């Protein structure tokens, strides 16, 4: 029972994060599921993907009410993503993951800092 | 929107799919800055649009995972129940905040996620065993 409450709490927190920043929220959800519910990383990852469905749908609807959605851009990005994701899983086995993560991670840090200080 | 811009957006969407699978992060953190910087959308519209894209992408992820990892509906419903309350509150909060402030908040998130990615990369290079969980929207 207390675990049920903890899971709902994880959802609440991840939901706020998702709605506020326009992301799925998996990055906070996965470690929290592992920590509070003592479930495996793999299970937490699969579960968070499923939980993102209602979370992102409700948040998107709220942005839609305020007409803060560009449907044309959304359709094109979704089209690309659906093709790209399996491709990514496919090439993942062939690249040096460490160097790639460090490179992209640094890029994300610098874009993030630019957004903060501009 | 010109044809060229349209094609560019599809290509970026595909890159987002590849990059998020490789880095183990969700598409949102990559798509939102792309939309504000390259497409000049407002931070609010970029976030709303990102959320719309996340739904079918996560659904595809769920379907792909289904065979390897059975998940319990009970867990999903519990997280989802708290989640929809939270995301409604979070989205309302975002829409009430000025775009510039929201963009700064997002910048903090992006920098932190980037740092996390760098650290997992360094760790992965050092003990070179066990690639990260990888795929999907996080």
Image (cartoon, coloured by chain):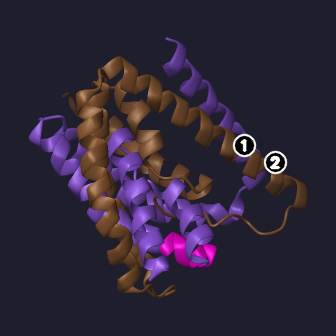
| Image height of A28 relative to A5, above or below | above
* Chain for disc number 2: B
Q: Residues within 10 Å of mark 1 (few under 14, many from 20)?
A: many
On residue A99, the disc is: none
Residue reaching furthest front? A2
Q: Are marks 2 and 1 in contact (CB under 8 Å)?
A: yes
Q: Is residue A73 left or right of residue A34?
A: left
| Image height of A109 relative to A88, above or below | above
| Image height of B5 relative to A10, above or below | above
Q: Which residues are magenta?
A: A39-46
Q: What SS does tag 2 mark? A: helix
Which quadrant is home to the N terminus of chain A?
A: bottom left
Chain B shade:
brown
Q: Nearer the viewer, residue B104 or A86?
A: B104
Q: Residue at x 47, y 40 (%)?
A: B30
The image position of residue A17, as x and y in percent, is 41, 47
Q: Is residue B4 visible?
A: no
Of all chains in the rendering, the one displayed in purple is: A
Q: Residue at x 35, y 40 (%)?
A: A20
Residue A42 part of the magenta-drawn span: yes
On residue B122, the disc is: 2
The image position of residue A13, as x and y in percent, is 43, 54
Secondary structure that dominates the magenta span: helix
* Chain for disc number 1: B
Q: What SS does tag 1 mark? A: helix
Q: Is residue A19 visible?
A: yes
The image position of residue B6, as x and y in percent, is 26, 36
Quote the CA–CA distance across marks 2 and 1.
6 Å
Report which residue position mark 1 lands on. B118
């Amino acid at each position: 029972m207390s675990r049920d409450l903890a899971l709902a709490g994880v959802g609440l927190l991840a939901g706020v994060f998702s709605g506020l920043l326009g992301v799925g929220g998996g990055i906070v959800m996965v470690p929290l599921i592992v920590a509070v519910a003592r479930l495996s990383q793999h299970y937490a990852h699969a579960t968070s993907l499923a939980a993102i469905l209602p979370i992102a749908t409700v948040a998107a609807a709220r942005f839609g009410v305020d007409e803060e959605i560009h449907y044309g851009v959304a359709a094109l990005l979704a089209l690309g993503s659906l093709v790209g994701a399996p491709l990514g899983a496919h090439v993942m086995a062939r690249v040096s993951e460490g160097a790639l993560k460090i490179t992209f991670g640094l890029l994300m840090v610098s874009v993030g800092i630019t957004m903060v200080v501009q | 929107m010109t044809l060229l811009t349209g094609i560019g957006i599809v290509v970026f969407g595909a890159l987002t799919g590849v990059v998020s699978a490789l880095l183990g992060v969700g598409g949102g953190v990559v798509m939102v800055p792309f939309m504000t910087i390259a497409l000049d959308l407002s931070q609010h519209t970029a976030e709303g649009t990102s959320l719309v894209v996340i739904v079918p992408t996560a659904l595809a992820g769920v379907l792909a995972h289904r065979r390897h990892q059975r998940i319990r509906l009970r867990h999903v419903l519990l997280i989802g129940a708290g989640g929809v309350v939270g995301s409604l509150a979070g989205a309302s909060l975002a829409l009430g905040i000025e775009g510039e402030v929201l963009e700064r908040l997002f910048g903090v998130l992006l920098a932190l996620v980037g740092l996390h990615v760098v650290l997992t990369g360094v760790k992965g290079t050092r003990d070179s065993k066990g690639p990260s969980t990888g795929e999907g929207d996080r």
